[in-house]
Image: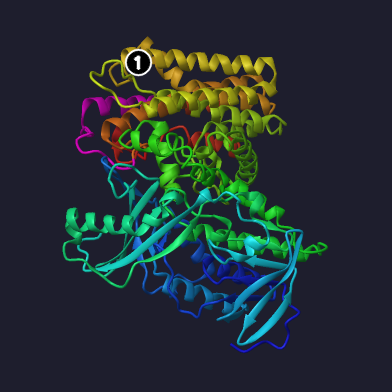
């Protein structure tokens, strides 16, 4: 590369040309900023990595316009989790828009393609260049010193982006490294050829044992298909006290694969094992100082359960670039303030990463609960499993059914309100139960959002048209109420088991979570005063009575759901998740009393339809909570129980639509009508109509 004539006009200097740094340089260049991208290596260059790209990473790469250049990419349709001693579960991406897939791309190719994209956008690239130190320090960074082609340069710029990896020297110099080294792990990987019958899935093994086979470690192994019978095989370890054994852990993992996995009988290593550190100390307060922003591995943005980091590197690089551009556009004085960038990362990521950052200390909480409940498809455990092990494939707020697309004017207000509700939810669970932070997520167009109580409350409020100041707090309350109910439903009765019993980690977790979430739900409900608390308590009473009845009589079925007991059970299922949010929303929105009553009736009926639809899924082996269907768990679609439940679903859905006749026409009523029937795909409804319930 030629040294440019001007060295004093850069808006930003990006140190490190991996995915995070290249993404930051690309975005800055696209925004018209003069940016220098430096890396100490020449490209193409390899890097120790699993090479796995999640669906989120693929979408970001598509936005950058580089997918067509990744000629060596292997597509994958999801993740296979192999839990030690408990078998395997598959988690597949949904594909609503044609981008429901991940990829495996060797870093030798990926990083070179991303660098070329940044250069085409206008970034200046220096390879073989080394950042020797910052100008300034923790109080403020004004640029960076670079050694390049035998010369030393002092480059002043409003912002420096540190994308220099897990061992970031710039982060250390700025005082941003955690003083506690406990959060650092290590990974090792190698390539193997002649591996037979590799599925198009990212395969992760959890957890691994130490070399004595007596101690289970906070660790994972992986087997990722690269294509043409080649696999990227590696291990990650999150406990630094065993760091010296990572090579032995890797060799043992490979030996076990060769000895027990028929796919590896003829496998041959293709090159040496390589290793790299893992940083698990993500902390929003340590993501930058004035003039310096950390991205990717330098910020500790590595999945604490699977080691994935490329999607987080890409996202953080783009966010850092946007922050720098905003500061320059508004002519902010002095070095770029990283605080808004840190706040964005906190909202998007902190709960998930904090779960893993403390997983060594909270071993009984995070890892043992996942292990103890791996075979259990009850709602709380299935949600936690997905959020921890497959967050990229879980719907935002996945509680009920996918949300149909609202009318544009309603979608705009709904997204704004749900962002506010999501932040309330994240704030109340982030410190104590951070794995739930992502349940409140909302994307740009609501395409990945699922129906949940807060959605019903906000849509019902839109009927009246008044924006009540308490709508966000009460929407958070009903969401927490539903989550607490799912936790209660997930507790297991172990009284009848004989002999020594293992520690009931699942039950402990369910009870603690239920109590915590219920207390927080009441805190939000209390903002509405005594009448709202009384309504909330009444709904919970009905729900508890229905649950008690279900424990005695069993779930509703086509034969008894219409009885008095069956009606009480369905009322319990609908009380918190459907009827309460519809009634509260109508009142908050200023609707007239007859309209509020109609909305409450709608909630009761649509809640009953959804409860019956859930039973139908369980019968046919299509439960939303399981990662993959269990053999022999389903009954035939012509089973009398299925036929009976289908008829009842249709009956309650029709009653819900009839209740809406008293509701004024508009986008809100239209969306409520579309929500009246749960999506039951593949099932034949009355009159031969196929009811679409997934």
Q: Residue at x 61, y 46 (%)?
A: 347
Vertical side of 494 occupied by 247: above or below: below
Is residue 296 in view?
Answer: yes
Left or right for 506, reference 252: right
Q: Which residue is mark 1?
A: 551
* Camera-side residue of 220 and 196: 220
Callout 1: helix, strand or loop? helix
Q: Position of residue 563 (x, y in %)?
A: 35, 12
User: Crowding at label 1, few (<14), some or many (≥20) Cα neighbours within 10 Å?
Assistant: few
Q: Which residues are magenta?
A: 627-651
Q: Nearer the viewer, residue 447 or 338?
A: 338
Work out whether 133 lies above or below 373: below
Furthest residue toward right: 333
Is residue 318 inside the magenta stretch? no
Residue 200 placement (x, y as % from top left)? 30, 59
Image quadrant occupied by the N terminus: bottom right
On whether residue 646 falls in the magenta region, the answer is yes
At a point 18% along the width and 55% down the height, the residue shown is 259
**Residue 158 pos. (x, y %):** 75, 68
Quadrant location of the C terminus in the rendered image: top left
Rendered image quadrant of residue 335: bottom right
**Residue 12 screen position, x and y as percent:** 69, 71
Residue 655 in view: no
**Residue nearest the viewer, comparing 25 with 466:** 25
Seen at 35% across and 15% down, the residue is: 551
Tell me how the rendering is colored. rainbow
Q: What residue is drawn where x is 53% and y is 17%? A: 539
């Amino acid at each position: 590369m030629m040294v440019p004539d001007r060295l004093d006009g850069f808006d930003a200097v990006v140190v490190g040309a991996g995915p995070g740094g290249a993404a930051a340089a690309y975005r800055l260049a696209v925004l018209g900023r003069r940016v220098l991208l430096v890396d100490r290596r020449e490209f193409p260059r390899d890097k120790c990595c699993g090479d796995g790209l999640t669906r989120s990473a693929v979408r970001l790469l598509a936005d950058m316009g580089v997918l067509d250049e990744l000629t060596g990419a292997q597509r994958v349709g999801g993740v296979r989790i192999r839990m030690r001693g408990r078998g395997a579960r598959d988690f597949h991406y949904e594909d609503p828009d044609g981008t429901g897939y991940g990829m495996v791309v060797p870093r030798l190719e990926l990083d070179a393609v991303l660098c070329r994209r940044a250069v085409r956008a206008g970034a200046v690239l220096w390879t073989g260049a080394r950042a020797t130190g910052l100008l300034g320090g923790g109080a403020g960074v004004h640029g960076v010193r670079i050694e390049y082609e035998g010369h030393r340069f002092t480059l002043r710029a409003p912002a420096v982006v540190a994308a220099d990896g897990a061992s970031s020297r710039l982060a250390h110099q700025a005082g941003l490294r955690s003083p506690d080294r406990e959060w650092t792990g290590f990974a090792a990987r190698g390539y193997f050829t002649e591996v037979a019958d590799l599925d198009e899935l990212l395969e992760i093994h959890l957890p691994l044992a130490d070399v004595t086979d007596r101690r289970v470690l906070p660790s994972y192994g992986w087997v990722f298909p690269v294509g043409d019978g080649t696999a990227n095989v590696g291990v990650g370890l999150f406990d630094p006290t065993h760091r010296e054994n990572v090579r032995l852990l890797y060799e043992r993992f490979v030996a076990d694969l060769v000895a027990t996995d028929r796919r590896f009988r003829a496998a041959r290593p293709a090159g040496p094992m390589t290793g790299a550190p893992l940083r698990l100390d993500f902390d929003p307060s340590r993501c930058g100082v004035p003039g310096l922003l950390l991205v990717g591995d330098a910020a500790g943005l590595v999945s604490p359960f699977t080691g994935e980091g490329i999607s987080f590197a890409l996202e953080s690089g783009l966010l850092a670039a946007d922050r720098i551009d905003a500061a320059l556009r508004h002519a902010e004085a002095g070095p770029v303030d990283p605080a808004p960038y840190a706040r964005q990362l906190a909202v998007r990521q902190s709960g998930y990463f904090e779960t893993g950052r403390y997983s060594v200390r909270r071993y009984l909480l995070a890892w043992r609960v996942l292990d103890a409940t791996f075979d259990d498809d009850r709602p709380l455990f299935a949600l936690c499993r997905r959020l921890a092990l497959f967050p990229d494939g879980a719907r935002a707020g996945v509680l009920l059914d996918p949300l149909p697309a609202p009318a544009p004017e309603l979608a705009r207000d709904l997204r704004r309100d749900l962002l506010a509700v999501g932040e309330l939810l994240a704030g109340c669970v982030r410190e104590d139960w951070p794995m739930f932070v992502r349940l409140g997520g909302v994307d740009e167009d609501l395409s990945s959002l699922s129906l949940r109580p807060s959605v019903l409350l906000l849509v019902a409020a839109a009927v009246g048209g008044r924006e009540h100041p308490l709508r966000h707090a009460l929407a958070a309350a009903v969401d927490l109420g539903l989550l607490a109910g799912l936790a209660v439903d997930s507790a297991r009765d172990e009284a009848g088991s004989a002999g020594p019993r293992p520690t009931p980690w699942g039950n402990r977790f369910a009870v603690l979570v239920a109590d915590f979430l219920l207390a927080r739900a009441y805190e939000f409900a209390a903002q509405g005063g005594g009448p709202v608390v009384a309504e909330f308590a009444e709904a919970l009473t009905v729900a508890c009575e229905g649950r008690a009845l279900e424990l005695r009589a069993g779930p509703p079925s086509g034969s008894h759901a219409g009885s008095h007991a069956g009606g009480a059970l369905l009322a319990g299922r609908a009380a918190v998740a459907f009827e309460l949010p519809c009634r509260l929303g109508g009142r908050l929105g200023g609707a007239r009393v007859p309209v509020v009553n109609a909305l409450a009736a709608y909630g009761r009926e649509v809640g009953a339809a959804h409860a019956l639809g859930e039973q139908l899924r369980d019968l046919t082996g299509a439960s939303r909570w399981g990662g993959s269907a269990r053999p022999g768990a389903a009954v035939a679609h012509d089973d009398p129980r299925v036929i009976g439940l289908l008829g009842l679903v249709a009956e309650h859905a029709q009653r819900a639509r009839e209740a809406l006749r008293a509701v004024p026409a508009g986008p809100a009523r239209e969306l409520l009508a579309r929500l009246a029937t749960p999506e039951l795909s593949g099932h034949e409804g009355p009159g031969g109509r196929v009811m679409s319930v997934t």
